[in-house]
Image (cartoon, rainbow, N blue to C red):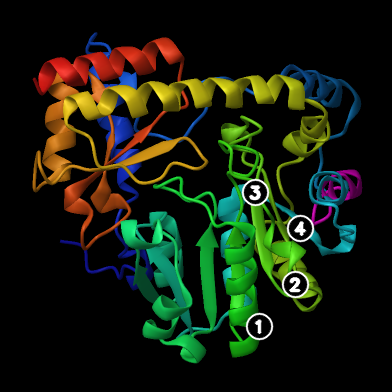
Amino acid sequence: MSRLKTGRRSDIPPFIVMDVMKAAADRAASGADVLHMEVGQPSTGAPAGVIAAAKRALDEERLGYTLAMGIEPLRARVAAHYRDRYGLSVPAERIAVTTGSSGAFLLTFLAAFDPGDKVAILRPGYPCYRNILAALDIEVVEIPVGPATRFQPTRDLLDAAGGAGLDGLLIASPANPTGSMLHPDELADLVAYCAANGIRYISDEIYHAISYGVPEQTAAAFSDDVIVINSFSKYFCMTGWRLGWTLLPPDLARPVERLAQNMFISPPTLPQHAALAAFDCREELDVNVARYARNRDVLLAELPKAGFDRLAPADGAFYLYADVRRLTNDSAAFCREMLTATGVAATPGIDFDPVDGRAFVRFSFCGTTEETAEAARRLQTWLA
């Protein structure tokens, strides 16, 4: 046995959806079919304008290092996005282009918090929040949410979690895994609560532009002190390009820049040049959102027939979070059996909620409508 030391920061839980992806890939490699509802990855690739811009960049650009905060034209284009979509005037100097939203979370957590600080997140929620914070020795304060509050927090829940004793609050709207959203007045109230109590508000907005009748609002509309994180992965269908951004408060721009210089040197160069075209591809991208809406309608109609009749409100994103306690008390085993019996890959709730997640399963519906309908049909047959 090796006596070499292993860093304790690596002793964090796995990102379980990646393990489910591997199991699905193993099944596919054996020749069996898989209907992918486990991962939040659009089934379409990057839009045509992005591909064309990437090809031009390969021919015309040196593709060396860029500035640590990203190329100036892309920072300016992201700033223009806040003007065009939300009516906000945002200086490009407050935009940091990052290596995916994951890079944005790491940089902003390091810039905003110290070891031992307390940052509140929702349970259920995106597991990497918890795991990155834990790896940085930042104390994670979990706020349990459920149907009573539409899987979003309230002032009473924040008070119960420590209120003024918190150093940060991280909220996603639309949320992963539930798809629930904060209404603008609720978002404004949470930002005001954090301002009154000296709490850093971090807004995960990577599913903005994917919603179903509920208007999105950016937290930046209510304060210059919030941290907003977004990505080219979801709406823009650029998951593997690994590009995101963060809109920073003025006091964090230079700290994030220093950290980015040392940790990443710069974001990946080719995706930055390609992403310049992404904001001009909305017509193509909105076709995808229309497909997600159809898929959502199919599942809302058909999943209850298979026994999945207790669903979180899917206001946005492309997920349904199903309470399956009537079917199982072990969602991990249930998902393994589901994959084996039906070829439908889904993610157990324990990835998002280590306490109550054994009673939940997340279905992603960003594939084709035909595959979505077939998955529902197989589940109905399996659980009949």
Between 68 and 176, the residue placed more toward the observer is: 176
Q: Which residues are magenta?
A: 67-78
Residue at 57% across / 34% down in the picture? 239
Tell me the amino acid under the disc marked 4: Ala
* Horizontal relation, residue 118 to residue 352: left or right: right
Tell me the amino acid under the disc marked 2: Ser
* Horizontal relation, residue 222 to residue 344: left or right: right
Q: CA distance from mark 3 to mark 4?
A: 22 Å
Q: CA distance from mark 2 to mark 4?
A: 18 Å
Mark 2 residue element: loop
The residue under label 2 is 223
Mark 4 residue element: strand
Query: Which quadrant would residue 45 be assigned to in this image?
Result: top right
In the rendered image, is residue 146 in sight?
no
- CB atoms at circles 2 and 4 under 8 Å apart? no
Estimate the x, y position of residue 273 in percent, counting from the top left. 82, 35
Q: In terms of sequence position, does the residue under pointer 1 or pointer 2 come before the other?
A: 1
Location of the C terminus by quadrant is: top left
The residue under label 4 is 96
Point out which mark residue 216 bears: 3
The residue under label 1 is 195
